[in-house]
Image (spheres, rainbow, N blue to C red):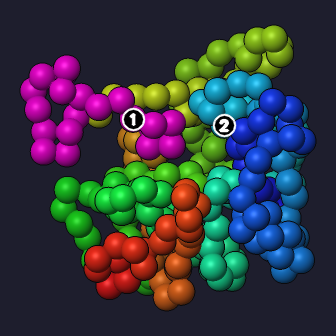
Amino acid sequence: MLLIATPVRGAAPLSGDVKFGYAESRARLAQMMPVSFMPTSVGFSCDIVRARNRIAAYVLRELPDVDRVFWWDDDVWPEDLRLVQRMIDTGEDLIGLPYTNKKTPIRWVHQFLNERPQVRDNLLEVRGVGFGLTLTSRRCLEKLSASARQYTDHPNPHKIANLFGQLYDPPIEGSAESEDDMLLSEDFSFCKRWRALGGKVLIYAGAGNMTTHAGPYGFSARDMPGGLA
């Protein structure tokens, strides 16, 4: 079973604003394949790090039938929903769809490796991916949870793993000064932990992988010079 997990911003869970493109795409995907949706109360009223940690812990604790989680932000969507099944079919533990930021200058959100490898079998290994359209396996969550620091999720009694806690990373060009380090976002921190365990972070680079990231309007690779190459 595939579970869709979406962080939603709002004063109350059901009053959160989402983009129509996301809502329409999610409804269509539910008609195409068996999916389940994350209960709205699990991660509500907490920051994105703790919300994502709670979701991962809830899946492992309460949902034994879920074998993959599709982390899907409410302002981004794939133009071809068949890409979700194609990502599942790769069998990879951590794989995302490429999408851009949502302001100029337009750039890819994912981080490339210093030595960029070639695309093989529609897959590109990268340093980190944003979790706007990213698939993780249950095995990935279990393995990371076994190695991560545990904490009590007050006011809940559960002991959960800090999979998304923010880590530091030196700039890609390297520096010996710790003050030059960058503070990674929660999704890139997850990727760093996974790579430290020997896992791969991948982008699905197959045909038709056009995605939209909604800001003032829907940004995509069409807005970026060379983005469609």
Can residue 174 be seen by looking at this rendering?
yes
User: What amino acid does circle 1 point to?
Assistant: Leu
Which residue is at the front of the view, 189 or 208? 208
In the picture of the structure, the residue carrying the numbered disc 2 is 52
User: What amino acid does circle 2 point to?
Assistant: Arg
- Tag 1 near tag 2, CB within 8 Å: no
Who comes first in sequence, dot 1 or dot 2? 2
Can residue 53 be seen by looking at this rendering?
no
Residue 112, placed above or below residue 228:
above
Residue 139, image x and y in percent?
A: 64, 51
Is residue 64 covered in magenta?
A: no
In the picture of the structure, the residue carrying the numbered disc 1 is 184
Residue 136, placed above or below residue 152:
below
Residue at the spot 76% in from the left edge and 71% down from the top edge: 25
Residue 37, placed above or below residue 88:
above
The stretch in magenta equals 170-190
| Mark 1 neighbour class, 10 Å CA radius: few under 14, some 14 to 19, many 20 or more | some
Find numbered disc 1 in the image and state the secondary structure of the residue it sits on.
loop
| Mark 2 neighbour class, 10 Å CA radius: few under 14, some 14 to 19, many 20 or more | many
Side (left or right) of 107 relative to 32 = left
Residue 81, image x and y in percent?
A: 70, 78
Which residue is at the front of the view, 20 or 181? 20
**Quadrant of res 135:** bottom right
Residue at the extreme bottom: 207
Residue at the spot 43% in from the left edge and 83% down from the top edge: 121
Residue at the spot 55% in from the left edge and 72% down from the top edge: 211
